[in-house]
Amino acid sequence: MGIPRRRFLHLAIGATALAAAPKLARAQAHPTRRVRLIVGAAAGGAPDILARLIGEWLSGRLGQTFVVENRPGAGGNVATEGVVKAVADGYTLLLTTLADAVNAALYPDLHYNFIHDIAPVASISRDPTVLVVNSSFPTKTVPELVAYAKEHPGQLSMASPARGSIMIHRHALQDRLAAILAIL
């Protein structure tokens, strides 16, 4: 038994119209569960406070809990590696700092490639980084400081909280300046 001609034409026109109509798609609601915001610094520092403020703001805006998880160690490498190994589902975020970029030059045996394994989502702050010396020190610019450090190997030192952070433990300054300048 055949389809009546009128019915066939209605079906053909309907099929053609469906094919030509724009595809409708709806985005899934995200997030649908709690989100972890990993910070590579101890609780109470500037990165932690910034993460908690951003987490609270995102929680209010998106209606889901954002949990700040501090994973200090190795200048932020512990936190970064943890995020790289996490399931890439958008529920584990990393608050990065300049230390993550510096670490690529300081640590030759990282288990991740920061540039390829981490995808930027948003810039949430900008922090100035300042290199200072005593006013009686004979250099006034970074190139002068690097030249001076090369002329006086092992004689300069600087203070800092950890290797890989912006500041570095009391190690030979010229090695650290060379690593930082290699990035720039």
Image: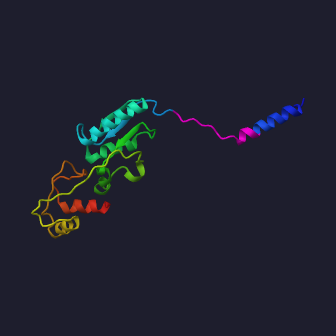
**For the N terminus, which image quadrant?**
top right
101 to the left or right of 157: right
In x, y percent, where is residue 29?
50, 32
In x, y percent, where is residue 59?
38, 31
Name the colouring of the figure: rainbow
In x, y percent, where is residue 126?
31, 49
63 to the left or right of 181: right
Looking at the image, residue 136 lies above or below residue 125: below
Q: Nearer the viewer, residue 72 or 129?
A: 129
Asked if one can make out residue 22 in the rendered structure from this viewpoint, the answer is yes
Looking at the image, residue 12 lies above or below residue 134: above
52 to the left or right of 16: left
Residue at 24 percent across and 52 percent down: it is 166
Q: Nearer the viewer, residue 30 or 83?
A: 30
Asked if one can make out residue 113 in the rendered structure from this viewpoint, the answer is no
Q: Magenta segment: does it hold 155? A: no
The furthest residue to the right:
1
Q: How many marks?
A: 0
Looking at the image, residue 152 lies above or below residue 44: below
Residue at 19 percent across and 48 percent down: it is 161
In x, y percent, where is residue 110?
33, 51
**For the C terminus, which image quadrant?**
bottom left
Residue at 62 percent across and 37 percent down: it is 24
- Name the dominant secondary structure of the magenta segment: loop
Residue at 28 percent across and 62 percent down: it is 181
Q: Which residues are magenta?
A: 16-28
Q: Magenta segment: does it hold 17? A: yes
Looking at the image, residue 123 lies above or below residue 4: below
